[in-house]
Amino acid sequence: MRSTQRQRNAARRAFTLVELLVVVAMVGVLAALGMVGYRKYMNAAGIAEPKAVIQGIRGGQESYKAEMLVYLDVSGSLDNWYPAGTLNDQKRAWAGSGALADSWRLLNVTTDGAVRFGYASVAGVGTNFTATPNAGFTWHGLSGPPLAEAHYAPNGPWYIIQAAGDRDADGTLALLLTASTMSGIYWENDTE
C-alpha cells in the first residue's frame, strides 16, 4: 500500500514527456519572437545615428541662416563626405583638420563620438536647385530623385543634407537625404 501511495505522489510531482515538450516548444516560440524584435531594434539603432546628425546639421544650417541670411555650402558637392574616408562599416572620428573640417565647425555640429556614415551639405540661393543626390539609388515610392520633384524648388536660400554609409560592408550604401524644402528625411536601404 505504501509503495502505491509513493508512486502516486511521485507521479504527481514529476513532469510528463508531453508537458516537457510543450514547455520546450513555448520557449522556442518566445526565442523566435525575441530574435525578430532584436533585429528590428538593431536596424532602428543603425539608422538612428545619421538621423540624429542630420537633425543637428539642419539646426546648424538654420542658426547660420539666422545670422548670415543664407545657408552655408559646407561640402561643395553631395559626394564630398565628412568625415573623410571610405564609406564602409568602420567608424571615423568627427573631428578633423583642413578647410572642410573648418566649414563644418562653422555649423557647430558635433557628435558624441566616431560615426559610421559620411555627411555632405550643399547650399545655394534661388531656383538653381542643381545639386544631384548620390547616383545608384532607386528612390522607391517616388517618381524620380527627391530633389527633382517640382514642388521642392525653392525661391530663396536652400540647403540639401545627405548621409551615406555601408553598415554591413556589403558594398550597398544606405542613403539619407533631406532639404530645407522637405519636412522629413528620405532614406533608402536603411536595413542594408
Image: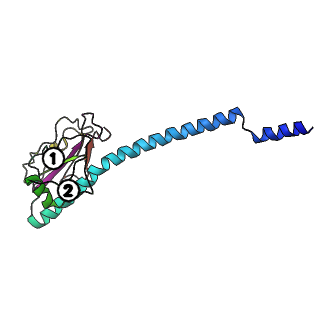
Task: Find residue 112 and report its image quarter.
Answer: bottom left
Q: How many marks?
A: 2
Instruction: Give the label on residue 57, or none.
Output: 2
Report the amino acid beneath label 2. Ile
Where are the magenta residues, as a range? 154-172
Q: Residue sitting at 80 percent across and 39 percent down?
A: 10
- Tag 1 residue: 84
Whether residue 123 is visible here, answered yes or no, is no
Q: Estimate the x, y position of residue 126 in percent, counting from the top left.
A: 7, 53
Q: Is residue 60 above or below residue 26?
A: below
The location of residue 6, given as percent across then percent down, is 85, 39
Give the SS element for disc 2.
Answer: helix
- Quick check: 67 above or below 162? below
Residue type highlighted by circle 1: Ala
Is residue 152 placed above or below 8 in the rendered structure? below
Rendered residue at 30%/42% (across/down): 190
Q: Is residue 11 left or right of residue 118?
A: right
**Image quadrant in which the C terminus is located:** top left
Where residue 128 sits: x, y (%)? 6, 49
| Residue 169: in magenta span | yes
